[in-house]
Amino acid sequence: MSVFASLVEQLAALLQPLFHGSATAAAIVLFTVLVRLAVHPLSRAAARGQKARTRLAPQVAELRKQHAKNPERLQRAVLELHAQEKVSPLAGCLPSLLQAPAFFLMYHLFSGGSLSGHTLLAAPLGGRWTDALADGGVFGAAGLVYVALFVIVAGVATYTYRRTRGQMADMDMGGVMPGGMAKVMPLLSFATIITVAVVPLAAALYVVTSTAWTAAERAYLYREPSTV
């Protein structure tokens, strides 16, 4: 843990001339960008997998009709189709799974640790939204930092919701995903707002930066030709 704390401190020292008292917060944003750059190749692989699953949706729908009364045979047939087309069902999960340690790192480093005394403007990086509400309210100095984060997250979540809703609808029509799940999954993008409200500000910064990166990354990857 001390190795990562040292890395954040070194990044903050480099950013000090530009961001002054908020240099540690800027270091968290930079750290997040570095993590996302590291897992970008996996995100590209996930995009290829998503495109392939969308392309295979009509074939999966046909398999569902053929094996409607035999779920086990259907499962084998779908797995065989994915294997034939070299589509991994786990590819889309890997980028998120590999980012989880970085999120928990920020959570622990700024939860009463040696770095918890740093701030983003007037908001302590180790504090939470409830602390900001108790110290000045929603529009207090610290509260306004959270207002800005909530606005960013809401904007990104709305964009992600609209994009995901269209993708899930295509998969639902193709029989790849049950209708109920196709309707619920787009709403999960708004869960980030709850996360930002309950975790330390340092972890919230990681979440906001990573979420914004994901939205921009997906917009880029899914505009590319099939050779992602």
Image (spheres, helix red, strand yellow):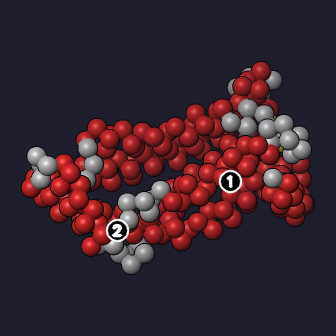
Q: Residue at x 52, y 48 (%)?
A: 156
Q: Is residue 223 above or below residue 94?
A: below
Helix, strand or loop at mark 1: helix
If the image is split into quadrants, where does the C terminus sit? bottom left
Q: Residue at x 64, y 38 (%)?
A: 196
Q: Position of residue 12 (x, y in %)?
A: 86, 57
Q: Is residue 139 visible?
A: no
Nearer to me, 165 or 155: 165
Report which quarter residue 84 is drawn in.
bottom left
Tell me if mark 2 has few (under 14), some (14-19) or many (20+) residues whose alpha carbon lies within 10 angstroms of its own. many
In percent of width and height, residue 4 lies at 80, 57
Label 1 – label 2 distance at C-alpha: 27 Å
Tell me the kind of residue under disc 2: Val
Q: Residues within 10 Å of mark 1 (few under 14, many from 20)?
A: some
Percent from the top left, x then y, of residue 155?
53, 44
Q: Is residue 35 above or below residue 109?
A: below
Question: Residue at left 66%, top 52%?
Answer: 101
When asked about the image quadrant of residue 200, the answer is top right
Identity of the residue furthest to the front in this view: 72
Q: How many marks?
A: 2
**To which residue does mark 1 refer?**
102
Q: Are marks 1 and 2 in contact (CB under 8 Å)?
A: no
The disc, 1 or 2, on the residue closer to the chain's N-terminal end is 2
Name the residue at 46% across, 49% down. Answer: 159
Q: Secondary structure at mark 2?
A: loop
Tell me where residue 191 appears, x and y as whole percent: 52, 37
* Amino acid beneath label 1: Ala
92 and 212: which is toward the camera: 92
Residue that label 2 marks: 87
Name the mark on residue 84. Answer: none
The residue at the far bottom in this view is: 227
Whether residue 161 can be seen here: yes
